[in-house]
Amino acid sequence: METHSIGIIMNGVTGRMGMNQHLIRSLLAIREQGGVKLANGDVIMPEPTLMGRNKDKLWALSEAHGCLPWSTDLDVLLADEHNKIYFDAQTTDRHFPCIKQAIEAGKHIYSEKPVAPRVEEAMELYRLAEAKGVKHGVVQDKLWLPGLLKLKYLIDTGFFGDILSVRGEFGYWVFTGEHTPLQRPSWNYRQADGGGIIIDMLCHWRYVVDNLFGNVTSVSCLGANHIKKRWDERGKPYDADSDDAAYATFLTDQGVVCHFNSSWCVRVRRDDLLTLQVDGTKGSAVAGLRDCVVQHDSATPKPVWNPDIPSPIDYWAGWTPMPNTRPYDNAFKAQWELFLKHIVADEPFRWSLKEGAKGVQLAELGLKSWADRAWMDVPEL
Amino acid sequence: METHSIGIIMNGVTGRMGMNQHLIRSLLAIREQGGVKLANGDVIMPEPTLMGRNKDKLWALSEAHGCLPWSTDLDVLLADEHNKIYFDAQTTDRHFPCIKQAIEAGKHIYSEKPVAPRVEEAMELYRLAEAKGVKHGVVQDKLWLPGLLKLKYLIDTGFFGDILSVRGEFGYWVFTGEHTPLQRPSWNYRQADGGGIIIDMLCHWRYVVDNLFGNVTSVSCLGANHIKKRWDERGKPYDADSDDAAYATFLTDQGVVCHFNSSWCVRVRRDDLLTLQVDGTKGSAVAGLRDCVVQHDSATPKPVWNPDIPSPIDYWAGWTPMPNTRPYDNAFKAQWELFLKHIVADEPFRWSLKEGAKGVQLAELGLKSWADRAWMDVPEL
Amino acid sequence: METHSIGIIMNGVTGRMGMNQHLIRSLLAIREQGGVKLANGDVIMPEPTLMGRNKDKLWALSEAHGCLPWSTDLDVLLADEHNKIYFDAQTTDRHFPCIKQAIEAGKHIYSEKPVAPRVEEAMELYRLAEAKGVKHGVVQDKLWLPGLLKLKYLIDTGFFGDILSVRGEFGYWVFTGEHTPLQRPSWNYRQADGGGIIIDMLCHWRYVVDNLFGNVTSVSCLGANHIKKRWDERGKPYDADSDDAAYATFLTDQGVVCHFNSSWCVRVRRDDLLTLQVDGTKGSAVAGLRDCVVQHDSATPKPVWNPDIPSPIDYWAGWTPMPNTRPYDNAFKAQWELFLKHIVADEPFRWSLKEGAKGVQLAELGLKSWADRAWMDVPEL
Amino acid sequence: METHSIGIIMNGVTGRMGMNQHLIRSLLAIREQGGVKLANGDVIMPEPTLMGRNKDKLWALSEAHGCLPWSTDLDVLLADEHNKIYFDAQTTDRHFPCIKQAIEAGKHIYSEKPVAPRVEEAMELYRLAEAKGVKHGVVQDKLWLPGLLKLKYLIDTGFFGDILSVRGEFGYWVFTGEHTPLQRPSWNYRQADGGGIIIDMLCHWRYVVDNLFGNVTSVSCLGANHIKKRWDERGKPYDADSDDAAYATFLTDQGVVCHFNSSWCVRVRRDDLLTLQVDGTKGSAVAGLRDCVVQHDSATPKPVWNPDIPSPIDYWAGWTPMPNTRPYDNAFKAQWELFLKHIVADEPFRWSLKEGAKGVQLAELGLKSWADRAWMDVPEL
């Protein structure tokens, strides 16, 4: 029984996502549970080093978690043989040069999405990593949401019969910041700073659809800039000029129609912030982040259109919640564990830089579809 | 106080819709309530004559409702001076010649939708009626659904602030007929017989959007033929080759994005068979056929994305049902009363043959958008 | 469009079952609805003649239903050419001679179950009818109970995956008659009068199992005479010496284990007077007389045994009621309509005298299993 | 007031049952509450020594509970005079030699069930213990389940009148391990490893029936191997060849018919994982693990069979839950306290090795009944 200590450079870990999801709820949680156990009894123990540009923030974060090592100098960290993995949670426009440098230093790569602002850059990173022979992966956390794992279970067990269509509804009301402070970073609503919901969310929808419903073959996307004035973190008004809603339809090579609405300008009357309704010949399901309800053919009512009377059918009653038949871990942590096993024990890991590039590709084509007012084919990368 | 008796030729009244909605729940209900009262105290009393091609059915329908007059001969009925209105509820392909003949005979025209299979024919009828100087209207019943009247109230009272987007979900599971008999006519699923959900439903969405959210200026529509084999009324399998779902997005001259899913292959997890979610800067509403719930800015929660725990917000709790502040009549009857007042007292009635033609136009452009994989502009008629 | 009038001799129609289920709710209901419609538009109109031994009862029954023809003389009725069908709802021991005579007179035969007290007699009737070339059928009403039709739907649509086992629970508390009058005939509890629950109910279970779960190949049955003293219709105590409960297990050629408890000495804590729980690899269902609830694999909870705390799982919550997707007719009437179509239009009808004999066979073998304390094979008839 | 410290060798305590139920929830809980109080004010204080074959596990278990003494050497522990009781929770095939050795060393014996794989061995242990003059007992925990204690109360107070029959339903859906990990050890489903539900559960049913409804005099049992392929703890498929369901009927010397279904292939639509329905002339009860509902004669409805309408009787409404009139301890702990009193104060304890042998006897005869397809008499031991 051996313990494999493995150094991880965590670049951009002072941001909200890097800190909460990747450091605290993933790597530190793995350390607390005694590492990741392999089939042969060995244990992988991640040893993170914090990296960023703001020394104060790094120092504070280190202090708060038992004096973790930290640095602002990528060269130094890459030179350290103990560091085997380079992880990047910086803003998108900073990924490319750092990941490239890390590949050259022979580090394995793990990156937040979107892996790069444009698909060519994302693919270049993929090719560089392959050429160098390092392993690589991209965060695709939604696949490990309990709700989506339940959907996966239904697909694997043939619950749906033939899957016909998927309705995705993502979003919630993001306050403008005028009377109620906004609950997302203000740059999300500025084009110049890389904002926009299409680039943010279509990366997600790509791997969700690819993994569950077949490879995306074409896309039609309408963006909208519904709210044009917002107030930033300091309460100052600014031009909110990026797309804050996207109405997108995807077709897959399995013939499934996937329509996804994504919006920061919608009030939520549904089971969860993200819901996926899947309809098949034999049954339907609506998954949220954690829960999933099903309606099998046998429980499907036969409605008759008669608006003169209140509906004799309670449309909510015919759905059954799926029970929790196993514990569900944090989605980010689940993917981290798989990545660490991939590095140490060479277990399979299909969520590579190329898969990450596919997400960027779909976002780009979505933007082009909006501009050209037409469907776009999605070529193989 | 005068009573205006007015003869109405009801062609195609032996069909399900003609019989239930137009004859029984509209005209006979109006007769039972003592006619339609005008502002000056006068009363309009409709006097329907049943018309169709099957004598047995006509006779039986007449018998069942107190021996109403009936005939299979349009010439005879048009020659009768007492008949002032020609109403057509036949299948779409039969409308054109009959309505044309009725216009020539100087009758006022009222017709079920789609008024014709192609927009040129629909517009020709409009031009003929205008040239002849007869009055005319097309059934647009959904506008008088209690749920949509409540939406109208919210719009008129400025509840929404600026309206940003509309999500329409229409549909339910239509059984294939294999194990459970289908609950809609089998021809709906055969192209050769005029089936298809696009021609059926986009006519509705046109007037709903035009009347509530601004004139439709462009459309993107994807049709789907999800289920390719069905069993007909006699239990025999057939090729179901028409579109049974439509994923359509409309833009309006008020800048509202309207996305409507229509499907006969979807299981219902929502408030009603048709729901319209309207989101505005100041509030949102979700209307069904009869009810409507609202969430004002003041009641809008501020969700935070954290899939590690069950949502601390109950997304259903923040919505309030609108009360019924007035009685709601059958939607078809409501429009009939307005049409009769239009005929007798010249009250305004904006749902003309031209408006009907607009519905056909949108369906045609929807089909073209599907074929061409591109957005279509909607020219003025 | 022709009307086929068809005379039916209804022997034993003054009994509870004959009167309520066969005369009033079946044949008279069919007359009221305008007969049975055939595919070609023709109509079958049954014309019942009441028959029995008590003139007063016959006269009263006739009067109550519009002066139906009646007689106590079988010879006369059989001689009448208009009578095409002989139906027998007498007590079991009277079936044989009357049915035999009717076969000889060339009448088609329809009979209540058990068709005879012993399997040889039941089979002799079958052979006589076949030799004479008359058509024949036996009442197997439970197959048309809405609850069992729903089960059939689940089986036909593959809901269960592989069916593993069936738990049948039939019965309720039949009062002894001492303080509360008994709600079943007292002869049911006297051996000498043909009482006993095994002969009564195993006939039903045979066709239920054969039709839904595979042909019965062996049986183990324990009878019990739980309550030995009862009070009859006049309040007089008597020896209740027949079996009033049966604990029977059947195996089928599809490898399904069917365990059925039948009892008149059980209080009901279940969904209905008869429930069938079917468990399969993919899902389970519990059907009652009219309703059926399902639990699909996807909704199956994962219980852990811990009696120290109240169960964290609500075992009722994971079941969904099947909706009514079509109207359900009276079960007896449904079978009558099929039989009439079989007679007039030669439509298929598999519930023949031979099928009736199978029911008697199972009851006989059940009794033998009880006596011999061993499993019995069920040979083919 | 004296304190009687009593050393207990706990063999096999690292297994799930030994650790949770016997060590933690029984003996450690007794220590925490200050021991077992006797009528004379004396106190019994159990002093457990952990025993097993895996030193790591023993050490960890000891550490976790305040450094309890532990050993892997039975000879050493038996040689220690302070140890008065030998308790065995190993797998069944290891009981015999260890218990025999402990008897020879003069220790009192307490053992998990089944006390041995075959009845002769179980009886030999009984005879050895009697010959040596040591005291002995076998775990029969279900007798102290709150639900069964409530049943006992009803029996003792004459609630049922004459008890006629008992319906036991035990079981739940054990996942195959293909898509959802199985929730029981995989060896339960392998014959070669001592798996099978008959040997597991009939031991329980023996003492439950003997203690509540009269001594079992005969048994008919059908085993079934419903699911033939399962996936083990490491996700590997294997042949599941042991019986996973048992359909058994027992007769008792009090004339009660007891039918028990036990299954790991059944979905639960009942009050609890184990339910016992008892029907008597004066009333009925359905007991679960903790709760029990009753229906007295006075509350018994009088149902009429009419499937044409929904049942006018709510069959659930006529049952009343029994209140908790006293605190219920963990069932294992309750029996431990009685056994300790039996050892120290010679209080009666009827659940001896002979009673344990009876359980094994019934399981053996159940298997033989299945093989021989016949009822088996249960001879006195």
Image (cartoon, coloured by chain):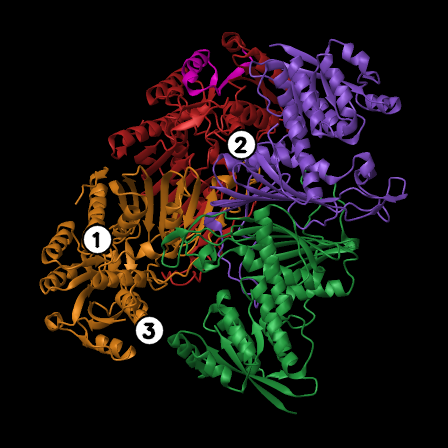
Chain colours: A orange, B red, C purple, D green
| Marked residue chain, label 2 | B
Which callout, 1 or 3, points at the residue further toward the start of the chain?
3
SS category of the residue bearing label 2 = helix
Q: In this view, does B210 lie above or below B99?
A: below
Whether labels 3 and 2 belong to a single chain: the reply is no
| Marked residue chain, label 1 | A
Quick one: label 3, few (<14), some, or many (20+) residues within 10 Å? few
Report the label total: 3
Q: Mark 3 points at which residue?
A: A32
Q: Give the distance between the C-alpha atoms of the residues marked 1 and 2, in whole angstroms.
A: 56 Å
Q: Name the residue under label 1.
A: A356
Residues at marks 1 and 2 touching, judged by CB atoms closer than 8 Å? no
Q: What residue type is labelled 1?
A: Gly
Q: Nearer the viewer, residue C9 or A339?
A: C9
Nearest to viewer (mark 1 / mark 3): 3
Residue B38, percent across and down? 57, 29
Quick one: label 2, few (<14), some, or many (20+) residues within 10 Å? some
> Could you tell whether D265 is left or right of D323 in the image?
left
| Marked residue chain, label 3 | A
Q: Give the distance between the C-alpha atoms of the residues marked 3 and 2, in whole angstroms.
A: 68 Å
Q: Mark 2 points at which residue?
A: B334
Q: Which of A79 and B332 is in front in this view?
A: A79
Residue D199, percent across and down? 55, 58
Q: What residue type is labelled 3?
A: Glu
Q: Residue at x 47, y 24 (%)?
A: B232
Q: Quadrant of the C terminus of chain B?
A: top left
